[in-house]
Image (cartoon, rainbow, N blue to C red):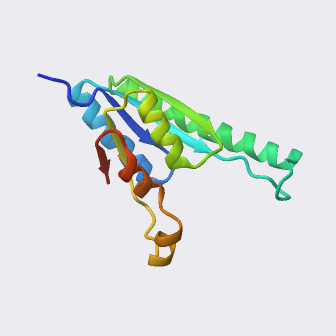
Amino acid sequence: MTKTFNHILVPFDGAPGSQKAFRKAISLAQSLQGKITILTCLEERHTFGFFKTKTSKQEFEKEQQVVEKQHHHLEKFAKDHNVPCNSKIVKNGMASTKILEFSKKHDVDLIIITKTKHSSQYERQHYHSTVENVFRNAPCPILIL
């Protein structure tokens, strides 16, 4: 049997949709003997516009710790299901751009992502969603849940 999807990428933001995508990735990786990478994009927020403050840095570090804990639980869940899994946290930048860069650089065979927000026509016209940008520019197949 030819392995179709050796490397599955799951963009993860902690929302119920991304948890659903992770469970689907576990199921596929088990049946196809593939591996999973969990990718979370964090953005540093500046409290007063252009300036980094001690408060914004502390908030970012707290958020990063929460994400690291989530990744640890997901990796343990994958290990319990005999699925190789690693995770990565990337800082700053547009989430869709980071997902696309990662998928190209690391030979990802499938991206499993969920569309959790229904945007208005105005919003879609001016602010493309992460899912839409990934869908239009991905170097590999995408499963949108």
Q: Is residue 79 above or below residue 59?
A: above
Task: Note whether residue 13 is visible.
Answer: no
How many marks overall?
0
Q: Please say if 28 is above or below 135.
A: above
Q: Position of residue 100 (x, y in %)?
A: 45, 41
- 75 lies left or right of 112: right
Q: Nearer the viewer, residue 19 or 52?
A: 52
The x and y percentages for residue 59 are: 77, 47
In this rendering, the answer to whether 54 lies above or below 9 is below
Query: In which quadrant will I find the C terminus?
Result: bottom left
Residue 144 seen in render: yes
What residue is at 35 percent from the left and 44 percent from the top? 112
Q: Which quadrant holds residue 118? A: bottom left
Using the image as rendered, state which of residue 40 and residue 95 is in the foreground: 95
Left or right relative to 32: residue 41: right
Please name whichever residue, 61 or 74, is drawn nearer the observer in this view of the structure.
61
Query: Residue, x 37% and y 27% (percent of image)?
Result: 107
